[in-house]
Amino acid sequence: MTSRKNKSKVIFDLARVREQRAAGVAADVIAAEYGCSVNTVYNFCKQHGLPNIRHQYGPATIDAVRDLTAKGRSAAKIGAQLGLKACAITKIRERNNISRPPSCVDRLDLNEVLSLVEQGWTYAAIGHMMGCTAQNISMIMIKSGHRTRPHKKRPARAILAKCLHMSLAEIATKYGVSDNTVRRWLESYDLALIKEPSKTFKLYGPPPKRKRHSESAVFSASPRAIKRALAQVAR
């Protein structure tokens, strides 16, 4: 197995980087100077025995994290944009008292959502009106103690075993649940449905077998392969 080669083509000035580290220059400032990522600077300092500079960031990076956090960006998206990991963004927020803005779920009015649900509005329609997604509406309903759908108790194994001749959709309709719920029930009981023949097979019977060419039956090859062989022999 070949060893992994370093693909970095950045040429650092060791003496200058050593002076910058002695002066306490942050890693992101050095990375911006050489046009590389912060991890590249980390690796270079580690290889040459320079002081540990992890989790030390300059004012430009801190201001960028503060601005992107105010816009509602997640730590993963901010890290991808700045060339950092999500955990590093989280530490920058904690050390510089950068608070995240309230989420969409926290800004929603529960009473308004409940009134719209009683009027027959779907979660997608409510989310579109309030500027969020249907998952956000479902989340606020669950957090407030309102289940999005009635809880269905799992039937006993003996009762469910009698429904194995039915299809997945038929069992789901019978108990008023989704197909995935029925799958989880079957997996928990280690049961499997009996495979039914398709409707096409019931109506028309099995499909007819294709007749093989006489020469193909003799030589155990396809007609195209036989034609190629005869053409080569004719040459």
Image (cartoon, rainbow, N blue to C red):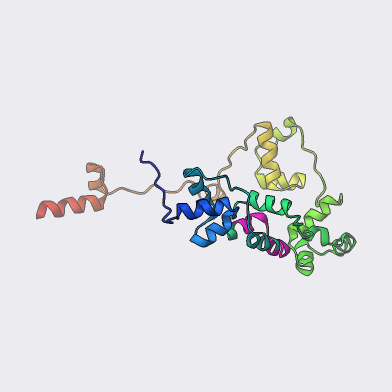
Q: Which of the 4 quarters of the picture holds residue 67?
A: bottom right
Asked whether the viewer can see residue 223, the reply is yes
Q: Position of residue 141 (x, y in %)?
A: 83, 54
Magenta stretch encompasses residue 164? no
Q: Which residues are magenta?
A: 67-79
Q: Is residue 71 above or below residue 50?
A: below
Task: Return the residue nearer the eye: 78 or 21.
Answer: 21
Q: How many marks?
A: 0
Which residue in the rendered view is the most extreme toward the left? 235
Left or right of 107 in this view: 10? left
Left or right of 77 in this view: 158? right
The quadrant the C terminus occupies is bottom left
Q: Position of residue 88 (x, y in %)?
A: 64, 50
Task: Return the residue nearer the eye: 159 or 63.
Answer: 63
Q: Position of residue 115 (x, y in %)?
A: 89, 63
Q: Identify the residue at horizontal 77%, vertical 64% (top origin).
A: 127
Q: Which of the 4 quarters of the picture holds residue 70?
A: bottom right
Q: Identify the residue at horizontal 71%, vertical 62% (top origin).
A: 72
The quadrant the N terminus occupies is top left
Q: Is residue 22 above or below residue 2?
A: below
Task: Return the residue nearer the eye: 22 or 107.
Answer: 22
Chief secondary structure of the magenta span? Answer: helix
Asked whether the viewer can see residue 147, the reply is no
Q: Identify the residue at horizontal 30%, vertical 48% (top origin).
A: 212
Q: Position of residue 93 (x, y in %)?
A: 71, 54
Magenta stretch encompasses residue 74? yes
